[in-house]
Every structure is written in structure tokens, then in C-alpha cells.
Amino acid sequence: MTTARAHSQAASRRLTLRAPSPMTVVRWVVVFLAATLVFLPVYVSVVSALTTNGSIARNGLVPVPSALTTENLRTAATAVPLVREYAVSVAVVILQTFGEITTAALAAYALVFPRWRGRGIAFALVLATMAVPGESLVIPNYELVSQLGLRDTVFGVVLPYLAVGYPIFLLRQAFAAVPLEMWEAARLDGAGDLRALFTIVMPACRPQVTTAVIWAALGAWNGFFWPLLITDSANARTIQVGISQLAASESGSPAVIFAGSVLVVLPTVLLVLLAQRFLVNGLARGVLH
């Protein structure tokens, strides 16, 4: 009886609701306000894309869903060659991400496992490139791409981003945490550098590699200034440039512009949501290492 009464009292204490502390309330209020600031532009864009221009004018800053329609999405897709530019953006993302991650993995591997003089200096130079403003490289990149005859081509859009400092830094930090014994055992088994990299090192650093892939893909998809500068026609123009031109078209009403923005943002949102776990784990491990 005593034991049963003690268990009953303990259960009742666990079920007792405690009033939150003032700091907890303040913390939740701050989180709610921050979430509202982040979610409000998304809500306005999505609702405005699915309503008419008249509804946008009547509702003001925060539209109310009413008489939803998908006509704006169809108009945005046909006002400018968005389908073609969508395909170009997908090609740019695939090529740029593949090239960027490949060069980053090769460079990070060379900075960690082979023992050679000057590795520290080489890594310092990689870090130094991260401090160089991208705007200062626009003119040299433009002259290089023009001299190679790659203006107004997908390869011209991709070329300046085939080697970037941040993914090299991220993967170098991840590879440095791989036990050296694993690499030495692979080499003793006859594995070459490429086989050791792609079958031993990179699988052991899957969260960081996934983070680098997502980072590179988002950067390729959201690129605007360089594609705008280096392309002249829709054959190599990305979706970001196409949306900027949507406002100047005859169909560029506010609702249609919102619809085009939703079409552009949707793939990146889906990518981040699907890979959120890998993104968080990769960044956390990169910081700890």
C-alpha cells in the first residue's frame, strides 16, 4: 500500500502543470515574432500569386485568401520563356554543383591526407580567397569568358564558380576529422587516391558533403548578377533573370510577378526542407571540427 501510494503521489506531481517563468514567456514571444517576420513574406507571396490584382489592391499589406485561382501561374509561365529558363537553371545547378563539389573534394583531400610541404600555406590561400569580394572578380571573369567564346552559353555561366573557397574549407575540416588509419589501410589495400577519396573519405563525411552540395546548389539557383551580365538570350538565361524581366513584360501585373516569384522560390524551399537534417548536422559538425 505504501509503495502504491508513493507511486500515485509521484504521478500526480508529474501531472501538475507549472506556470511558465517570465523568461520562458519572453523567449516564446521572441520566437513567435521572429517566425512571423520570416513567414509573413512567404504568406503574402503565395496568397497574392493565387488571387487577382483587385484582391491585392483591396486587401493591402496582408492579403486574405479569397477567390483563389491558378491563372497567374499560367500567365507567368507564358509571359516570358520561363519554361526554357527553368530548364537552363536546372542545367546550371547540375553542372555548377557537380564541378564545385568535385574540385572542392579534390582540393580538400590534397590539403589533408598527402603529406607535402606547403599545405598550411595552400590552405591559408584558400581562406584568403573567401575574403575577396565577388564584385572585384566580375571584370576578369567577363574578359576570360569572352576570350574563350563562352558568352551567352550555359558553360559561361558556370565557369567562374567551378572552384570556390567555402566548400573547400568545409570539406577540408570534415576530412581532417577522418582517422588517418582508415586512409592508410585503404592505401595498403591498393586503393588509389581517387578510390580512397570517393569510397572511404567522402562516405565518412556524408553530412558535410551533403551540406556543401546544398550550399552549392542554392548558390547556383539564386545567381542573378553574373547570368544577367554574361547572357543575351533566353538560350542561356536563368530563371532569376527571367523573373526580373517579367515586370517589364505586358503581363507583368503584381499578381503575375508574385506568381513568378513563387515558381522561382519553390524548388529551393523544397530542397531545404527535404535536406534540413543533413544541413544542420553538416554545419554543426563543421563548426565542432
Image (tube, helix red, strand yellow):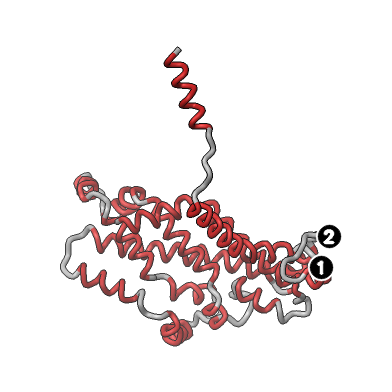
Q: Position of residue 20 (x, y in %)?
A: 52, 47
Q: Position of residue 35 (x, y in %)?
A: 57, 59
Which of 247 and 45 lies nearest the eye of the viewer? 45
Q: Which mark is residue 42?
A: none
Q: Amino acid at mark 1?
A: Ser
Q: For mark 1, does the 10 Å Cα neighbourhood hold few (<14), some (14 to 19), or many (20 or more) residues?
A: some
Q: Position of residue 242 (x, y in %)?
A: 65, 75
For mark 1, what is the residue?
55
Judged from this view, the residue extending furthest toward the left is 117
Report the side of 152 relative to 190 (left or right). right
Tag 1–tag 2 contact (CB < 8 Å) = yes
Judged from this view, the residue extending furthest toward the top is 1
Which residue is rendered at x = 33% and y = 65% of the image? Answer: 169
Along the polypeptide, which appears first: circle 1 or circle 2? 1
Report the side of 118 relative to 276 (left or right). left
For mark 2, what is the residue?
67
Q: Position of residue 258 (x, y in %)?
A: 70, 69
